[in-house]
Image (cartoon, grey):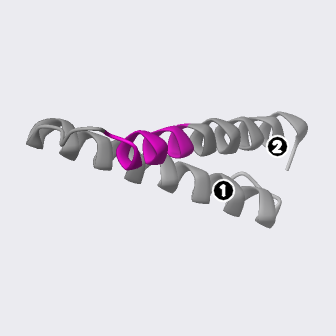
Amino acid sequence: MDDASRKRAVRTALISGAVSAWLIYDIATASEAPGTALLWLQYGLLALALIGLVGSVVMLARGGAGG
């Protein structure tokens, strides 16, 4: 893995982790139940952030950017 790919994977992991933590906090501490559309949006964004986090960690662990 070259330096640019490693930086990109680390940056993606950090951003995805931060977004995941923020969404989990936001969902867990909501004082009232959100509307159905907002609930689906939050869970969809959380799923995408977790997929990005796992993908970045896998790329870093494999030492390559997809190959």
Which amino acid does the dot numbered 1 rest on? Gly
Q: Would you say residue 67 is visible in this rendering?
A: no
Mark 1 nearby-residue class (10 Å; few <14, some 14–19, many ≥20): few
- Residue closest to the eye, 64 or 53: 53
- Residue closest to the eye, 34 or 58: 34
Residue occupying image coordinates x 82% and y 43%: 6
- Closer to viewer: mark 2 or mark 1: 2
Residue 34: quarter of image: top left
Q: Is residue 12 magenta?
A: no
State the image coordinates of residue 20 (x, y, percent, origin top left).
52, 45
Q: Which mark is residue 50?
A: none
Q: Secondary structure at mark 2?
A: helix
| Rendered-image quadrant of the C terminus | bottom right
In this rendering, would 59 be left or right of 41?
A: right
Which amino acid does the dot numbered 2 rest on? Arg
Q: Secondary structure at mark 1?
A: loop
State the image coordinates of residue 13 (x, y, percent, origin top left).
67, 45
- Would you place residue 32 above or below residue 56 in this image? above
Read off the magenta span. 19-30
- Would you place residue 4 above or below residue 46 in this image? above
Mark 2 nearby-residue class (10 Å; few <14, some 14–19, many ≥20): some
| Farthest-out residue, right | 3
Q: Disc 2 vs disc 1: Cβ atoms closer than 8 Å?
A: no
Residue occupying image coordinates x 10% and y 43%: 36
Q: Would you say residue 51 is visible in this rendering?
A: yes
Residue occupying image coordinates x 21% and y 44%: 39
In this rendering, would 2 be left or right of 32?
A: right
Q: Which residue is mark 1?
A: 66
Q: Is residue 29 magenta?
A: yes
Q: Which residue is mark 2?
A: 6
